């Protein structure tokens, strides 16, 4: 597959019928950046024996008890249109889960089921961004948030993280300076993909104070909140410091905690007064989520704690298993992360990371994502997902170390 | 549930914390019209014994062979991220199906799997409409198309159907007159929800000629194409007259033919050159469709013909079963439809159809959708979905006839 950039998608001087057709497509669609991760996946997807560490996804399929709950509902005929806000039993299960994890009041009416965390972001952006509005996104960041803003005709404003010997940190002054009269929101992902950054409680308070003072929304992506390697059981959360009517929209997913990446189911948490608006947006985006999938999600929340605990322990061990040998080579720049399940590393002297990622497919049979996919500040990095089993991680690490010894 | 209008959603003078919060939401979201159908469903959803004829959904659950294909894939671990364009086997199955039904060339690269026909519409609109652009929609129409345009900051332009003794027909002059320099597309649903209108091959040719001459896109919603009660096996289609590079985007769904409404899976058909753009949009809207659902969809296409034939025969019989006794009362204005599976009827003297629909829930225990939900031209109508079994249809008809005798 050749690289698809907006330059190649939109021919400067349309000549063929295909070029003319493409020239008739909305610039909001053709100017979208292609996913630098999908490009790599498509490039290497069918390679024999390749170990894929490029996407934010583990190697475990969804646990059987979750699949069985969904399959049972399918066979019982739960195949009709359902509540646009999510089936009441799932909203109640989410509320119980959030109460257990975050000590918040059990209020099902704050939670709205939607068709992936990605759709939760689109709903949050539809709530906050009109065409021409701006949203601040600290980068490097998972690229889909910025792209979702672009699909709406809004403007994502990148504010690079500071980077030092301790890794990435938020630069509050640059964030404050980036706020303009068109700024409606700030997108905060913590623990963060791809950097492994985790905002402290103090950092969250600083952000909240800033958002309150400047009248902007916070879109909080805390989907890796439980993949946290500090002393506490989970990462600090806006739930720890917020008031109920703060302008915070949480986007959430079942993908990571419960190994349900392929399902496309998540939720958005918002003040209940937004319920009718969110219900409308769900209706007009995809018209709800399969009820049989929602039964699987209920099982995940109610009975999934042993699995989640195992996933987190596995990720913690996986981080050491990959990071320590790579650091020992002396050939990579890598700060061990505090949360999420990615290493974000650079190789001094190897600046063209898209080409580097393609080479690692061809020469080491491992799939990493190029940092260019994650916006300003990511240009010289590679992202490696370590949410896999010991066998694959040790083999992938050996291949990578060997490649480094040969080539760097 | 109280009616949610933009007026009530956006308080004129925000006073409470909730009002102020709502006032901070993008007007593109709060100004969305609430679904007049969802309002009714939420009103009557839990009524004992209510016969629901309000949504475009039959009473049959998804056939077991489709559920089994999906459940089997779930148990085999097909729970990971997958191709954003759809798994290749499903795209090939769609191509085979379209070749069988429409005699078109078997070209999998024209078909892109997405998370509902609703999402297919959003993708088609993202391809054609930038903020401020216009799309022409003949009305009465399924309201979600106009709403999807609004969520993008685009402007849906209603052009009412002509209405006469033979029912609804397209008014080509009014459509041509509605085209402005901002018009980018026209949305054509045939056979049509809610009117039962079916465009003839000649009408489609007139529309295509107009679109070609004025340089606008056609978004073709032919999801009811097989629910057709004329002498031919299916309704006329743009596929019968188009060239491969015509600016036509087809939106499709598995919902109706295969009784998969709750699943949220469909496809978009587009010139292959748009592939990378569509792949991006899928990625940034919901990031794909569950692979196990796609296995169910393959089973539907490959093995579903007996079920589809049974569904169509049942709808044809259901139409007569409901329409004939209603017409015989002499109290309704109703032209029997040529396609789809709705009656669109009015009751002379009963103009407030939202209230009328609420009364029919309370007084006849049947659920109809108010025509006000379908835009200009629908104000005095009710929509009734007859895609149900004989027992429920006869009972619902008896209740409706009895109500008419008592109240009109």
Image: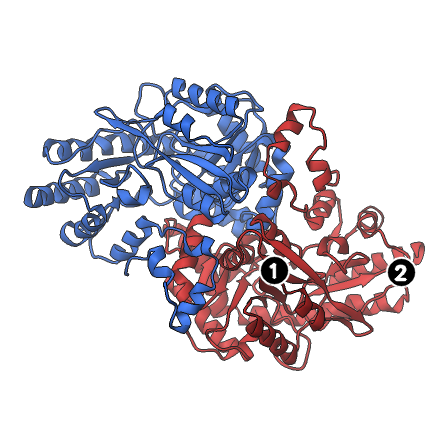
Chain colours: A blue, B red
Residue A57 placement: quadrant: top left
Q: Disc 1 or disc 2, which is closer to the eye? A: 1
Residue B388 locus on image (x, y percent): 69, 61
Residue B335 lies left or right of residue B102; in this view the side is: right
| Residue at image point 60% right, 58% down | B134
Q: Is residue B58 visible?
A: yes
| Residue at image point 66% right, 72% down | B313
Q: Which mark is residue A226?
A: none
Mark-to-mark CA distance, 1 and 2: 32 Å
Q: Which mark is residue B135?
A: 1
Residue B259 locus on image (x, y percent): 58, 60
Residue B211 locus on image (x, y percent): 58, 71
Residue B384 locus on image (x, y percent): 75, 59
Pointer 2: what residue?
B348
**Residue toward you, A99 or A286:** A286
| Residue at image point 25% right, 45% down | A370
The chain holding disc 2 is: B
Q: Earlier in the sequence, mark 1 or mark 2?
A: 1
Q: Which element is circle 2 on? A: loop
Quarter of the image with the C terminus of chain A is top left
Q: Is residue B165 above or below residue A201?
A: below
Q: Is residue B361 above or below residue A377?
A: below
| Residue at image point 21% right, 46% down | A353
Q: Is residue A277 above or below residue B103?
A: above
Quarter of the image with the N terminus of chain A is bottom left
């Amino acid at each position: 597959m050749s690289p698809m950039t907006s330059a190649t998608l939109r021919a400067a001087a349309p000549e063929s019928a295909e070029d003319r057709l493409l020239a008739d497509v909305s610039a909001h669609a053709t100017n979208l950046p292609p996913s630098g991760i999908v490009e790599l996946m498509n490039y290497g997807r069918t390679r024999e024996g390749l170990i894929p560490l490029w996407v934010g996804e583990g190697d475990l399929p969804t646990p059987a008890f979750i699949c069985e709950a969904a399959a049972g509902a399918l066979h019982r005929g739960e195949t009709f249109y359902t509540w646009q806000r999510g089936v009441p039993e799932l909203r109640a299960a989410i509320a119980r889960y959030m109460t257990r994890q975050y000590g918040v009041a059990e209020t099902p009416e704050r939670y709205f089921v939607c068709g992936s965390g990605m759709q939760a972001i689109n709903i949050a952006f539809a709530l906050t961004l009109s065409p021409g509005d701006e949203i601040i996104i600290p980068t490097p960041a998972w690229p889909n948030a910025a792209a979702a803003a672009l699909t709406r005709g809004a403007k994502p404003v990148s504010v690079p993280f500071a980077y030092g010997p301790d890794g990435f940190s938020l630069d509050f002054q640059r964030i404050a300076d980036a706020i303009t009269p068109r700024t409606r929101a700030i997108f905060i992902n913590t623990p963060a993909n791809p950097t492994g950054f985790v905002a402290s409680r103090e950092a969250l308070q600083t952000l909240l104070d800033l958002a309150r003072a400047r009248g902007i929304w916070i879109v909080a992506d805390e989907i890796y909140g439980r993949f946290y390697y500090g002393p506490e059981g989970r990462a600090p959360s806006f739930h720890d410091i917020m008031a109920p009517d703060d302008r915070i929209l949480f986007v959430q997913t079942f993908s990571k905690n419960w190994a349900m990446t392929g399902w496309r189911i998540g939720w958005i948490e918002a003040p209940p007064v937004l319920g009718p608006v969110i219900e409308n947006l769900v209706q007009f985006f995809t018209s709800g989520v399969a009820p049989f999938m929602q039964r699987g999600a209920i099982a995940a929340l109610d009975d999934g704690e042993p699995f989640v605990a195992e996933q987190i322990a596995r990720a913690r061990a996986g981080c050491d298993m990959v990071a320590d040998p790579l650091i020992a080579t002396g050939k990579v720049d890598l700060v061990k992360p505090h949360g999420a399940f990615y290493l974000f590393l650079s190789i001094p002297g190897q600046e063209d990371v898209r080409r580097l990622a393609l080479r690692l497919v061809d020469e080491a049979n491992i799939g990493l994502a190029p940092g260019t996919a994650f916006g300003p500040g990511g240009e010289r990095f590679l992202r490696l997902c370590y949410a896999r089993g010991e066998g694959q991680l040790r083999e992938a690490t050996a291949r990578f170390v060997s490649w480094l010894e040969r080539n760097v």
